[in-house]
Structures are given as C-alpha cells and as structure tokens.
C-alpha cells in the first residue's frame, strides 16, 4: 500500500489523474473501473483537460462503473449514468458502447447482476479501479455488513448513506432506497486500486479502512489485503492518521 498526502482537493485530483493517465498511456485499451460522487469530479476534470490538450486518448478504453441507483434511468439527472456522461464521457473520446453502468431500470435483480458480472469478466477484468469512500467506510455501494465474497448485488442503502447523498436530491424522500453495486469481490479482483478521499468527513472512515480491523463492518478495510493499492488523500482526510503517524514522500506510513 502507498499513501500519498495531497495538500487539498485539487492536489488530490491532479495526483489521481496522473495515475489514471499513466495507466492509459501504458495500456491504451485499459479497463477502468470508475466511481461517482464528489471525490472523483476533480480527477475527471483534470483528465478532460489533458485530453483536450492532446496528451490522452480514450478511444480504446473500456469503463465499468461501480454502481447505479435502482429506479433511475440514464436521463434522470441524479442517475450515475447521467453523472458520468456530464462529468466525464461527453468531454472525451471514449466509445460510449464501451462504457458500462448497471441498469437502474432493470427490476429483475438476478438478471441484472449476472449481466454485469459477465460484462466485467468478458472485458478481461479491471486494470485500474478508482474508488471514493463513504463516511461509513463503504466502497461502491457496499454498505457495512456486506460480505467480502459479494459480486454485483442489489443493495439497501444505509441511513448514513441516504443522509450523505440526499444533498444531491430535492429531499431525502425523493431518493432511491436501493442500488445495484459491484461487490467487494469484483473490486478486489481489479489489478490495481486507486482510493481517493478529501475532507474531514472522511478522516475516521479512512483511518479505520487503513489501520482498523479488517471487517465487513468497514467494507473499505478489505483493501488492506489488496496487493496493489494506492491511496491519495488530502490533509483533512488524513488528519486522524497524521495525528499518530507521518507519511513519507514515497507514500510509506511511518
Ligand atoms: C457514494 C458512491 C460511492 C462514493 C461515496 C462517497 O454513495 N456510491 O462510490 O465513493 O458515496 O461519495 P463522495 O465522493 O461524494 O463523498
């Protein structure tokens, strides 16, 4: 595990974009596992900027997103499908036929989960999985208590997640209560994982994820067992860790 200390959100975003950019340059037909939420928005902005400058090409890239709300179609402004198009895909030259997101309008849970697992395996697995972290330690929408063996599944969103994500909706009652999410097993099978975190709100979850017991109660704690994990977090998100440790420029926690 390497943990890089970023000064702030913009610095975190640039550092994360650097790693994604390196992945695409080293493997132009890379499979990227992508995330939504506030954390990756700056990373996507930076990648768009480099694409526009001519430094990056997404034409051979495939993407698989982590999750989608059940009940929201791609034209719904709160769907993750809409989020990905407006924050990223519409601004780069990725082939839309190679961008995958769970279908929130599919009511047949088993059919959708099987379909999504098959997509991940057919594209040869994920080269680089980008992750944010929920303030309860969730990754994707894998809420506390999710078994580490899970593949794509239907999730009942926790109270804490509903409260945190309600900021995007008119009111908490208008929020979907369920989602489809890649499972922990899908995430752990990615060849490389890049976890990003910014802000004080994430400091407790990040501390528990990287230093706490490895337990389904903190889904992100399983990442300690991944053999190629890079964490990029800003000073606020790392504040709890920095109260007892220092971080070397090379990303080692001392
Ligand atoms: C959301 C998403 C996660 C995301 C997390 C943190 O619910 N399902 O993939 O990492 O919560 O979101 P944010 O980056 O907005 O804090």
Image: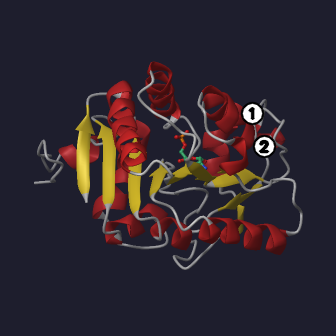
- Quadrant of the displayed image that contains ligand 1: top right
Residue at image location 36% in from the left, 30% down from the top: 14
Q: CA separation, marks 1 and 2?
A: 6 Å
The numbered dot on residue 175 is 2
Task: State the image coordinates of residue 17 (x, y, percent, origin top left).
Answer: 40, 36
Label pair 1/2, CB-CB below 8 angstroms: yes
| Sequence-first disc among 1 and 2 | 1
Residue at image location 32% in from the left, 63% down from the top: 228
Which element type, helix, strand or loop, lies under badge 1?
Answer: loop
Task: State the image coordinates of residue 62 (x, y, percent, origin top left).
Answer: 59, 51
- With 30 as the anchor, is 109 left or right in this view? right
Residue at image location 39% in from the left, 60% down from the top: 192
Q: Is 170 or 187 nearer to us in this picture?
A: 187
Question: Is label 2 within 8 A of ligand 1 (CB to nearest ligand atom)?
Answer: no
Residue 50's quadrant in the figure?
top left
Residue at image location 83% in from the left, 72% down from the top: 111
Which element type, helix, strand or loop, lies under badge 2?
Answer: loop
The numbered dot on residue 217 is none
Q: Is 56 or 247 nearer to us in this picture?
A: 56
For label 1, count other residues whose C-alpha is less than 10 Å away and answer few (under 14), some (14-19) or many (20+): few
For label 2, count other residues whose C-alpha is less than 10 Å away and answer few (under 14), some (14-19) or many (20+): many
Task: State the image coordinates of residue 48 (x, y, percent, origin top left).
Answer: 51, 27
91 lies above or below 203:
above
- The residue to which callout 1 is attached is 169
Q: Is 204 or 120 nearer to us in this picture?
A: 120
């Amino acid at each position: 595990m390497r943990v890089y200390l970023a000064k702030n959100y913009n610095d975190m975003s640039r550092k994360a974009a650097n790693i994604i950019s390196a992945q695409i340059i080293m493997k132009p037909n890379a499979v990227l596992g992508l995330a939504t939420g506030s954390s990756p928005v700056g990373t996507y902005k930076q990648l768009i900027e480099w694409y526009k400058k001519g430094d990056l090409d997404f034409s051979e890239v495939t993407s698989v997103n982590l999750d989608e709300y059940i009940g929201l179609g791609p034209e719904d402004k709160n769907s993750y499908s809409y989020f990905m198009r407006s924050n990223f895909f519409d601004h780069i030259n990725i082939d839309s036929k190679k961008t995958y997101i769970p279908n929130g309008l599919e009511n047949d849970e088993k059919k959708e989960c099987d379909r999504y697992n098959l997509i991940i395996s057919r594209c040869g697995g994920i080269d680089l999985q980008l992750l944010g972290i929920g303030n309860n330690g969730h990754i994707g929408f894998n809420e506390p208590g999710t078994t580490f063996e899970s593949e794509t599944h239907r999730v009942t969103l926790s109270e804490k997640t509903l409260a945190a994500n309600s900021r995007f909706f008119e009111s908490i009652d208008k929020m979907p209560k369920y989602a489809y999410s890649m499972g922990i097993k899908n995430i752990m099978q990615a060849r490389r994982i890049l976890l990003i975190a910014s802000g004080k709100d994430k400091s407790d979850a990040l501390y528990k994820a990287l230093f706490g017991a490895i337990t389904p109660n903190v889904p992100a704690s399983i990442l300690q067992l991944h053999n190629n994990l890079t964490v990029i977090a800003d000073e606020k998100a790392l504040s709890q860790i920095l109260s007892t440790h220092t971080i070397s420029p090379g990303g080692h926690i001392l």
